[in-house]
Image (tube, rainbow, N blue to C red):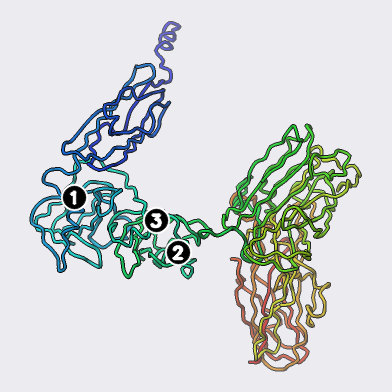
Amino acid sequence: MLAALLVGAACTRGPEIPGPFLRADLQEIEAPGFAVEYNVQILSNIGWRIASNEVYDWVTPSLTESRGSATLVLSVDGNEGTDAREGVIVLESDDNSVREEIRIAQRALSAEGFSRIREIRSLERTGGYTIIQGKVRGFVVTDAAASNYTENTFAVEDSFDEPSCGIAVSVAADRYAAPGRGTEVVIDLAGARLERRDGILTLSLQDNPTAGDATPLPVRPDTVTFADLATGDYESMFVCLKECQVVEDAIGGILASSPGITDESGAPLGRLIVSADSPFGSVAYARGGGRVCGIAGAVRDGICEILPTSADDVAFTAKRIGEKPGILELPYVFSFYCSSQTDGACKYINYYKLYWDPVTLLTSGKIADDKDESIGAALYVSAFASEASKTYGPNMWAEAGAHDNINTVGFVSLGSKTTPTAECGWYLDVPLRMTLPEHFTVTFGMGGNTYTIKNWTIYYSSDNENWYEGGHYSLDHIVEGGSYYLFFSVPIDCEIPFVAGDTLHLKFIPEGTTAIGGSNNADGHGSSCFIRFHSSIIIAEEKEGSTPTPSNAVWFEPFDHLTGGVDYFLGNKVGGLANFGGRQISDWDEEQLRGMGGHDVYERPGYAQIGFVDTERSGSRREYHNTAGALESPELGVSGDLTLTFEAAAYRSPAIRPGASTTTPDVGSPDINTGVIEVLGGGLVNGSESARILQMSTTGAFSTHTFTIQGATPQTRIRFTSAPAEGEFSRWFIDNITVTKR
């Protein structure tokens, strides 16, 4: 038995280890007569080189040696001679044990019996022309799957970098079969008719062309100018325009709207033609400038038509040509929000990992910038740390309450007992394409650990040299896990103007040595010195609205005098600051109250929030507690039947996202989307003393709701509230309350 086992063990095979290999996916290349490039995929697990090349004078390889798999680009020159030519490229492993050959044959540019496309184009005559002999060949540059070319028609080229080398080819509908893009076709000109169809010179055939014998090519565009296109010489060719953009009045559209395109001067010189039936017709393009590719179409009144072959043919950035980056309007949000519950998965900014410098003892540099390059805002950090604390941050954390934060250590003042080598703080640069108001607010989230400095100041500047004090704030609670993420809104009264072209520089700087935990020796060392800049930085103008009162209104409340808090409808960009309201109704002035009353109603910019959850001072996010609110109208002062309409929306935490923990209460049990209306002082609502508000919007927009008030008296008041079951959340928003006589 033992012998048998030993024999069995000896026969057991181990894992197969591949031997050295060197293979090319194109071993035979049949090249056309014009200049082309072929991408040859080399598959290998060893080092290799080009050992010999019989075609060096007319084929140029992109590399002569490599290790492992690689892409070898072979650039083939045009064959201006009358004879075909051929050669071989030999690849060999470094140890000469493995070799591979790539054979290349190239015919002459002008082969016997074949005409060039430019010769066919020169035959054009008014009224059409029938060709009775000869052949022409070229490569298909249109893509049938794009559905963005004339029906039963395709375009071919017999050179990718010369003018007058493209033509449209049409085939009878009952015989048409779309050839593949990049394949060669041979067109028999017997009986072909040359005519203009919808402005395009077209070869009309009865039957499909036959397949050519050339190796298929990657289709590449010829880069041209607007002036080139205006000549018509590039008609039916795959071309590329650089440094162009859509006309101003087309910004924000989709490709099927066929927008006009311009150069930097703004003169309309071209038009993108995209069919509504194309799979990319509904694709929206960026507002800025960049590259446009496509099949050159007709020239009409000096305007050149270009037919893209895919959505990728329109590659615009967010920035217009020659346009400097900057914000165009307030509010502006620099958002730390993560698209999922994954550290560093920033949705709106690029995050850059920084490292501690052992010489300066600083972590410093740009740590984030806005992904929208037309804005150009960037956040910088300078933090001082010892050897003991250098390993702590900076990191980008996706916090469970959407207080997503960039955190680091070592924020100390210049007067600290551990003197830093440079000023510490956060620095936000916001380029402007607008004039800032004299008064604006900077709203943001920040928190810190035990020995983090408590007191901070915001400074502002237009030149990054002369700084003005903007306002003070204090970190009065210590961050503990998912709790005590603080919100701040600091008003800035500018002593200097900021106009379009300037940059608003903001810096957030620690002052003194008092720590959040109460000690007076905050020195910025150790893991208990974390500073967490969280959720977002919002620059906004607090200004009152001016909604007109309906002429038939008995009572109308648009909340135009409410200006504080974060605008929830800015969306998830604001992150955890979405819960940050302004003053409670008990602190509103008479102009804001306008006879209203209630409790736990909070100020939002232009609308009110009913109900509240304190996310700043909860000891644990799992212990969030809902406080139901109630808003009461003034006495309506009329009798009879009335109609009540208003706009409403339910709160949804931005923490409800992929990967979020459903054990946290406002994710697992998000705010209800119902409310309650009660009539006080006489009358009924929809036939009862109270009625439920159903299906309030949860999509980040208001929905309109209508109720009937029967038998109102001059003392009738309306109460808006919510009555959730135990443990539920009931934050909701209200605006534009209108009562009219029926």
In this view of the protein, which residue sits in the foreground, 82 or 43? Answer: 82
Residue drawn at x 72%, y 51% is 427
Q: How far apart are marks 2 and 3 (CA)?
A: 12 Å
Label 2 vs 1, first from the N-terminus: 1
Residue neighbourhood size for the residue with mark 1, other residues' Cα within 10 Å, grouped as few (<14), some (14–19), many (≥20) = many
Label 3 with label 1: CB-CB less than 8 Å: no
Residue 87 sits above or below residue 332 on the image: above
Q: Residue furthest top?
A: 3
Q: Position of residue 262 (x, y in %)?
A: 43, 63
Label 3 is placed on what type of residue?
A: Leu
**Foreground disc of the pair 2, 3:** 3
Q: Quadrant of the C terminus?
A: bottom right
Look at mark 3 in the image and give the residue it sits on: 241
Residue 241 sits above or below residue 424 on the image: below
Q: Where is residue 391 in the image (x, y as percent from the top left)?
A: 73, 35
Q: In the figure, residue 2 lies in which quadrant?
A: top left
Q: Residue 116 carries which label?
A: 1
SS of the residue under disc 3: strand
Q: Residue furthest bottom?
A: 639
Q: Where is residue 507 in the image (x, y as percent from the top left)?
A: 75, 53
Look at mark 2 in the image and give the residue it sits on: 246
The reply, left or right, for residue 49 in relation to residue 417 is: left
SS of the residue under disc 1: loop
The reply, left or right, for residue 318 in relation to residue 443 is: left
**Foreground disc of the pair 2, 1:** 1
